[in-house]
Image (cartoon, rainbow, N blue to C red):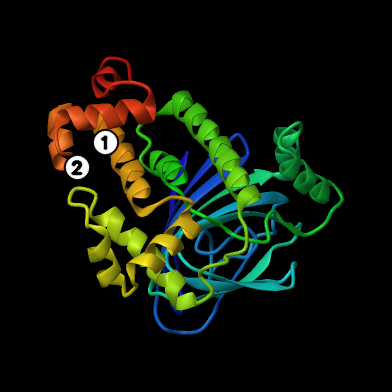
């Protein structure tokens, strides 16, 4: 069910894991690049998710709808079937479809991490029948044989999507249980992405690419300090923004305040530790910087509708 791959090209190496579940293909990849020009990808590959380089096989493109998540790293890619180039900064997602699939990727950072889900065309149409208006319009474009992007504006990766992707990558189930788990998570990602992209609007406040990169750096700093959260002024100094621009830019990009995002991430991490470790709720509260176990308990119950202790009793 899990297939690890390593592909080499003149400008770097990509290590990936592929899962094939009832015709749905999931892929997670980390690509490390040397500073050498664009990489040609085609067929089954989305940025960082498949074979690349002249020595790699170029399989015939499957007829699939691609759900793409950029987790880390910056890159541009030209999508020939759409006749468009996208300049993307880490933490984005969108849906795309074309019968043939040829893109040229140009990395702008030494490492890119991506995650993708490929839904067979007919399966996707079946899944989205009766779904949201936006998904049904997208599906109709596919039925009509058009090359199409779900949203003009790439959505920002949010904590819920990050959690689902982590759950897939770290899945400890086996056999049929794993198949059902991965199948349900692939559909959950589709719902989360479609809902977020349908609400995504053109950025109004952050017009400068450098400022957008600094907002991404602020998010990465928060994610790296969940156990010792930095305050707003420290984040602003670290990424080179004033506090006003940090707050406005962060809310515009991630649809959440800095503090709200931090709280979401800490609670998601707490849930994982409750499920995956033997640490007590009090120990986890201390590790994640909560003022007291009671404060942690209240925040956890507000977020998940249950106490930390109940996760251990009925996971």
Residue at the spot 35% in from the left edge and 54% down from the top edge: 258
Picture quarter containing residue 178? top left
**Residue in the foreground of this view, choosing between 2 and 118:** 118
Q: N-terminal of the two: label 1 or label 2?
A: 1
Query: On the rendered image, what quadrant is the C terminus found in?
Result: top left
Does 209 sit above or below residue 187?
below
Q: Which residue is mark 1?
A: 270
Q: Position of residue 96 (x, y in %)?
A: 68, 56
Q: Position of residue 157 (x, y in %)?
A: 48, 53
**Left/right of residue 104 with respect to residue 142 in the rendered view:** left
Does 124 sit above or below residue 95?
above
Q: Regarding mark 2 in the picture, which secondary structure is present there?
A: loop
Residue at the spot 38% in from the left edge and 66% down from the top edge: 244
Q: Which residue is mark 2?
A: 288
**Left/right of residue 280 with respect to residue 148 in the rendered view:** left
**Residue in the foreground of this view, choosing between 312 and 215:** 215
Q: Position of residue 105 (x, y in %)?
A: 56, 73
Q: Are marks 1 and 2 in contact (CB under 8 Å)?
A: yes
Q: Is residue 154 visible?
A: yes
| Residue at the front extreme, as displayed | 244
**Residue in the foreground of this view, choosing between 249 and 140:** 249
Q: Residues within 10 Å of mark 1 (few under 14, many from 20)?
A: many
Residue 136: mark: none
Query: Gap between marks 1 and 2, in whole Å?
Result: 8 Å
| Residue at the right extreme, as displayed | 144
- Total numbered labels: 2
Picture quarter containing residue 301? top left
Q: Residues within 10 Å of mark 2 (few under 14, many from 20)?
A: some
């Amino acid at each position: 069910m899990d297939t690890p791959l390593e592909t080499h090209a003149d400008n770097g190496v990509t290590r990936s894991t592929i899962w094939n579940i009832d015709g749905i293909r999931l892929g997670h990849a980390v690509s490390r690049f040397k500073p050498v020009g664009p990489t040609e990808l085609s067929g089954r590959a989305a940025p960082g998710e498949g074979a690349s380089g002249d020595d790699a096989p170029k399989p015939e493109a499957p007829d699939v709808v691609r759900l793409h998540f950029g987790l880390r790293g910056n890159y541009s890619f030209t999508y020939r079937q759409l006749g468009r180039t996208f300049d993307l900064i880490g933490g984005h997602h969108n849906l795309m479809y074309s019968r043939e699939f040829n893109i040229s990727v140009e990395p702008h950072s030494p490492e890119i991490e991506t995650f993708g889900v490929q839904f067979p065309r007919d399966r996707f149409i079946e899944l989205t029948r009766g779904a949201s208006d936006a998904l049904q319009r997208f599906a109709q474009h596919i039925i009509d044989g058009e090359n199409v992007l779900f949203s003009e504006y790439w959505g920002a990766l949010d904590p819920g999507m990050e959690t689902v992707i982590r759950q897939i990558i770290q899945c400890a189930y086996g056999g049929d249980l794993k198949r059902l788990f991965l199948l349900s998570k692939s559909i959950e990602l589709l719902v989360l992405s479609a809902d977020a992209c349908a609400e995504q609007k053109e950025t109004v406040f952050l017009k400068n690419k450098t400022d957008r990169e600094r907002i991404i750096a602020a998010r990465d700093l928060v994610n790296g300090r969940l156990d010792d959260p930095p305050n707003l002024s420290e984040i602003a100094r670290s990424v080179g923004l004033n506090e006003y621009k940090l707050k406005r830019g962060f809310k515009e990009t991630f649809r959440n305040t800095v503090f709200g995002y931090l709280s979401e991430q800490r609670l998601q991490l707490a849930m994982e530790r409750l499920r995956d470790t033997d640490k007590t709720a009090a120990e986890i509260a201390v590790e994640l910087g909560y003022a007291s176990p009671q404060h942690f308990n209240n925040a956890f119950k507000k977020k998940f509708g249950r106490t930390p202790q109940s996760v251990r009793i009925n996971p």
